[in-house]
Image (tube, rainbow, N blue to C red):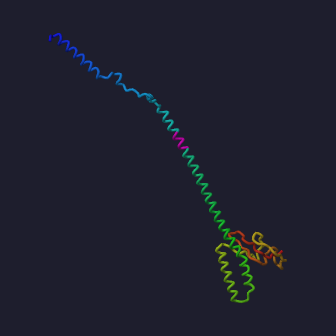
């Protein structure tokens, strides 16, 4: 083999080597990442002015404070209404309970009237003591219920507490409109008349 053939062989080998090296290198354009099909390119972030963001936060804070104040005012209003309702309900229950007890006591008044008449007409000392003991127990029961008798003998007639069933001429020196006698005691409880006293008065 002569020198010309050696030179041609070397040139061929160098060309192959260059082609192989070139095939392993990726084109510069292919190195750029590409977006997958169907996906949009992300929009560039907008620069929001710091002043507008601060103003928005202040507006949100002011609204939140106003809402909180409104909720607090409504809560106070509801609490006050509930407290008033609770007091009214308690007062109504107490009043109903007291009136119920008073109704029971009122039914005992005729029994007391009968015992007083029996005591006045009884001549047996032992019987009188027994009747008097029963009447004292009845009076103690009335005291426990804050019930007081109305028996205004010698006092001016009071139509708010008494009922005149008979009128007589006044004796010499007596005034007109004075209670001379009580036929049936009246009773009142804490200033409220449960039964009017039946009395005789002077004209």
Location of residue 98 by image quarter: bottom right
Who is closer to the viewer here, 104 or 57? 104
Residue 15 shown left or right of residue 95 in the figure? left
Instruction: Point out the residue furthest to the front here.
Output: 1
Position of residue 9 relative to residue 99, above or below, is above
Position of residue 30 relative to residue 111, above or below, is above
> Which secondary structure class fits the magenta region best?
helix
Who is closer to the viewer here, 163 or 111? 111
The N terminus - image quarter: top left
Residue at 60% x, 54% y: name it: 80
Residue 153 shown left or right of residue 39 in the figure? right
User: Where residue 15 sits in the image (x, y, percent)?
Assistant: 24, 16
Bounds of the magenta segment: 60-66
Residue at 68% x, 89% y: name it: 126
Magenta-drawn stretch contains 136: no
User: Where residue 153 sits in the image (x, y, percent)?
Assistant: 76, 77
User: Where residue 199 sits in the image (x, y, percent)?
Assistant: 78, 76
The C terminus - image quarter: bottom right
Location of residue 158 by image quarter: bottom right
Residue at 22% x, 16% y: name it: 14
Who is closer to the viewer here, 9 or 85? 9
Instruction: Point out the residue furthest to the right here.
Output: 169
């Amino acid at each position: 083999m002569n020198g010309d053939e050696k030179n041609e062989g070397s040139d061929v080998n160098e060309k192959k080597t260059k082609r192989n090296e070139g095939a392993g290198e990726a084109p510069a354009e292919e190195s750029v990442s590409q977006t997958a099909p169907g996906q949009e390119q992300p929009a560039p972030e907008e620069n929001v002015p710091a002043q507008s963001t601060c103003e928005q936060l202040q507006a949100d804070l002011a609204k939140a404070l106003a809402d909180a104040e409104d909720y607090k005012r409504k809560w106070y209003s509801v609490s006050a209404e509930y407290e008033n309702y609770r007091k009214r309900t308690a007062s109504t229950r107490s009043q109903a309970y007291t009136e119920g007890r008073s109704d029971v006591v009122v039914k005992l008044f005729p029994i007391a009237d009968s015992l007083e008449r029996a005591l006045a007409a009884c001549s047996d000392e032992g019987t009188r003591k027994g009747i008097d003991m029963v009447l004292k127990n009845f009076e103690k029961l009335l005291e426990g219920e804050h019930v007081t008798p109305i028996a205004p003998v010698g006092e001016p007639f009071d139509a708010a507490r008494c009922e005149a069933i008979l009128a007589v001429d006044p004796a010499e020196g007596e005034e007109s409109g004075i209670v001379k006698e009580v036929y049936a005691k009246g009773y009142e409880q804490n200033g409220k008349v449960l039964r009017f006293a039946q009395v005789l008065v002077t004209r």
